[in-house]
Image (cartoon, rainbow, N blue to C red):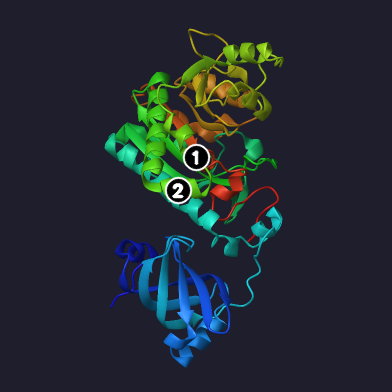
């Protein structure tokens, strides 16, 4: 016989099976031992009767403790009273790896669980989230592949900033200084002149001094850049991507969503096109709701949340003030003073999940913007070269993968959307 997964054993539903995994729970009496075994797919109750097993097997059953690893052989049957509706009557049991007293029980603080993240990852909650995370990454690649995008990669070590020098992580690079990437964008703009439509999924780093439930210092972004694409083309592409991700997760991870207590019906309602409004219209909406924001100020979390009280699916906000945007975002000729840019704001208080724009083609305008932001334009000469040899209109965006996962899973904190979170105050384990 071969070892099979718990899920496969349940699908078999009767007969002899061999499974292996880790002890989720265990209790025993004089003649009976109950072991709930878990593997990556599910849990199942295993019953060991002293009269039906060898002395060695009975001793192993009594010795089994939380998180010890086990191999079990026995007869599976349906049992409505069991945790997952099936039960295995054990004939053989072996402890493969013993377990010390497992430090995680019930009612621990968030900080304790973060300190023991290497062990807390074994929980059914985080296992469910990580399965959904895997589906999200697969869905992103699947969407881009089906739509003719090439996957490309850019350096993690960069000589200059993309999103502003105040959030750069400085790294000693031999006898020089480099920075951890904030985004692939500047390099992507060079690569589109070869492959036209490209995407990446990679880690990004922002040294933001933020302790909110929405921010990570190291996170993953799905980014795309495309030649000939205008802002509206990118918004449409972004909408399609978000809807595709949600569809794939619902199709593949309904069990995990249910375990997390996520309202799947809310996710099913998400459909393109999303509601659009300009930054100015967003300020007007906030004013009606009793919140005054001076034109020219960026929208904070509190304002985004207030806007989204009116909507049950993402909203696209366009045309933010040019003065507060990155140097590569051009002015909208139809709406002077604003940039050809957009953000996607997720419902239910999950904030910005996508940011994108058309790209500035005027190198002199970019140089002026960089100087105004305290940057040295000479560091960007290689980037300006891309405008000198057959420049074309192009656009791109970045999707914060952990923010999308947090929204889809209905998480209280973005830290649970990534295996080992890194924040301003969290750098271990």
**Mark 1 and mark 2: Cα distance apart in space:** 9 Å
Residue sitting nearer the eye, 78 or 4: 78
Which x, y percent locates residue 103?
66, 69
- The image quadrant of residue 413 is top right
Q: Residue at x 49, y 76 (%)?
A: 69
Q: Which quadrant is the C terminus positioned in?
A: bottom right
> Image height check: is 180 above or below 352?
below
Which x, y percent locates residue 102?
63, 71
> Image height check: is 181 above or below 352?
below
Q: Inspect this view and state whether residue 387 appears.
A: no
Residue sitting nearer the eye, 176 or 429: 429
Comes first in the chain, label 1 or label 2: 2
Which x, y percent locates residue 52?
42, 86
Q: In this view, does 306 lie to the left or right of 53?
A: right
> Image height check: is 329 above or below 213?
above
Q: Residue at x 47, y 24 (%)?
A: 357
Characterize the local packing of mark 1: few (<14), some (14-19) or many (20 or more) Cα atoms within 10 angstroms. many
CB of mark 1 within 8 Å of CB of mark 2? yes
Which residue position holds label 2? 132
Q: Which residue lies furthest to the bottom in this view?
A: 55
Which residue position holds label 1? 408
Secondary element at image label 1: helix
Q: Which residue is drawn at 34% across and 66% down?
A: 9
């Amino acid at each position: 016989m071969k070892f099979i997964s718990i899920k496969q054993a349940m699908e078999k539903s009767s007969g002899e099976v061999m499974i292996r995994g880790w002890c989720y729970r265990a209790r025993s009496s004089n003649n009976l031992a109950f072991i709930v075994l878990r593997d990556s797919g599910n849990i199942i109750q295993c019953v060991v009767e002293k009269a039906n097993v060898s002395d060695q097997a009975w001793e192993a059953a009594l010795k089994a403790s939380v998180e010890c690893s086990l191999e079990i052989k026995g007869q599976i049957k349906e049992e409505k009273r069991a945790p997952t509706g099936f039960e295995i009557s054990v004939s053989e049991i072996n402890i493969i790896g013993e377990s010390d007293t497992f430090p995680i029980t019930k009612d621990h603080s968030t900080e304790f669980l973060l300190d023991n993240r290497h062990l807390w990852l074994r929980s059914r909650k985080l296992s469910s989230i990580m399965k959904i995370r895997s589906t999200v990454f697969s869905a992103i690649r699947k969407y881009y592949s089906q739509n003719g995008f090439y996957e490309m990669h850019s350096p993690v070590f960069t000589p200059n900033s993309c999103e502003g020098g105040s959030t750069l992580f400085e790294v000693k690079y031999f006898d020089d200084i480099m920075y951890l990437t904030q985004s692939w964008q500047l390099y992507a703009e060079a690569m589109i002149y070869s492959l036209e439509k490209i995407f990446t999924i990679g880690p990004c780093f922002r040294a933001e001094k933020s302790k909110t439930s929405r921010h990570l210092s190291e996170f993953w972004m799905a980014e795309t850049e495309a030649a000939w694409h205008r802002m509206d083309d990118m918004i449409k592409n972004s909408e399609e991507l978000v809807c595709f991700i949600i569809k794939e997760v619902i199709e593949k991870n309904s069990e995990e969503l249910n375990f997390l207590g996520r309202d799947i019906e809310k996710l099913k309602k998400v459909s393109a096109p999303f509601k659009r409004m300009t930054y100015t219209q967003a300020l007007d909406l906030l004013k009606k709701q009793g919140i005054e924001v001076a034109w020219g100020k960026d929208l904070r979390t509190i304002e985004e949340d207030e806007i989204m009280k009116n909507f049950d699916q993402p909203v696209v906000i366009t045309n933010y003030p040019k003065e507060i945007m990155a140097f590569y975002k051009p002015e909208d000729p139809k709406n002077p003073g604003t940039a050809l840019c957009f953000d996607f704001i997720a419902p239910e208080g999950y904030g910005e999940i996508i940011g994108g724009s058309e790209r500035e083609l005027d190198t002199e305008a970019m140089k002026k913007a960089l100087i105004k932001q305290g940057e040295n334009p000479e560091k960007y000469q290689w980037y300006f070269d891309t405008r000198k040899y057959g420049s074309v209109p192009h656009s791109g965006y970045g999707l914060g993968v952990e923010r999308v996962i947090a929204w889809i899973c209905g998480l209280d904190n973005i830290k649970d959307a990534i295996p080992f979170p890194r924040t301003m105050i969290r750098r271990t384990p």
